[in-house]
Image (tube, helix red, strand yellow):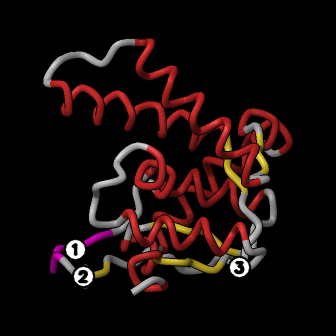
């Protein structure tokens, strides 16, 4: 969701933290990567945010404008886009099995800001599996459920904690 807070929902309380992450990427502290699976989730979030803001169904034209902003941003920032279908094609049976392993070993974590219990879900585990497959060093997220992930070499960057 860092892309959403940076590009679409700029009034959200997490915008400064997303902005700080992208500043660090721009300065070379991190190399940014994204998958087409994340692009699909971005589009879904855009539709919801725009519809809620306008109190009506978001137009395809408005959604396409936001998708174009994301594409331009990725190009400007030099963020590498991985095609999730190609990544999955190289190890098709491993992705969902690995996602299941990650979910099974993850521990529920009590949130530091909302005091609710969090864990990773199916889409979260697929994102992390894709990150492992492309050998990402770190996984940036606002989702505190990732703090409970065990058994991965990918470092969890919980952005609400990294950027206080």
> Which residue does the numbered mark 3 point to in the structure image?
153
Secondary structure at numbered mark 1:
strand
CB-based contact (under 8 Å), mark 3 and mark 2: no
Figure quadrant of the C terminus: bottom left
Mark 3 neighbour density, 10 Å: few (under 14) some (14–19) many (20 or more): few
Q: Distance between the residues labelled 1 and 3?
A: 24 Å
Q: Are marks 1 and 2 in contact (CB under 8 Å)?
A: yes
Nearest to N terminus: mark 3 or mark 2: 2
- First in sequence, mark 1 or 3: give its number: 1
Tell me the chief SS of the magenta region.
Answer: loop
User: Where 81 falls versus 53 (above or below)?
Assistant: below
- Look at mark 2 in the image and give the residue it sits on: 110
Residue bearing the label numbered 1:
117
Q: Which residue is drawn at 81% across and 65% down?
A: 135
Residue 44, horizontal then vertical, whole percent: 41, 32
Question: In the rendered structure, does residue 96 fall within the stretch colored magenta?
Answer: no
Q: In which quarter of the image is the N terminus?
A: bottom left
Helix, strand or loop at label 3? It is loop
Please tell me which residue is depicted at 29% across the width and 36% down the height of the picture.
Answer: 49
Near mark 2 (Cα within 10 A), the count class, few <14, some 14-19 or many ≥20, is some
Instruction: Identify the residue at image location x=45%, y=13%.
Output: 61
Secondary structure of residue under mark 2? strand
């Amino acid at each position: 969701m860092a892309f959403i807070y940076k590009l679409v929902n700029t009034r959200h309380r997490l915008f400064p933290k997303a902005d700080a992450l992208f500043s660090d990427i721009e300065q070379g502290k991190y190399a940014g990567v994204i998958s087409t699976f994340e692009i699909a989730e971005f589009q879904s979030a855009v539709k919801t945010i725009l519809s809620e803001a306008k109190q009506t169904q978001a137009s395809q034209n408005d959604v396409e404008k936001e998708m174009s902003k994301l594409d331009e941003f990725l190009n400007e920032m030099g963020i590498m886009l991985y095609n999730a279908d190609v990544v999955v094609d190289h190890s098709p049976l491993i992705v969902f099995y690995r996602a299941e392993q990650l979910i099974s070993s993850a521990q529920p974590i009590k949130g530091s800001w909302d005091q609710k219990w969090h864990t990773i879900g199916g889409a979260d585990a697929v994102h992390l599996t894709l990150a492992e497959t492309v050998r990402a060093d770190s996984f940036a997220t606002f989702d505190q459920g990732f703090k409970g992930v065990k058994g991965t070499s990918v470092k969890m960057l919980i952005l609400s904690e990294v950027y206080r």
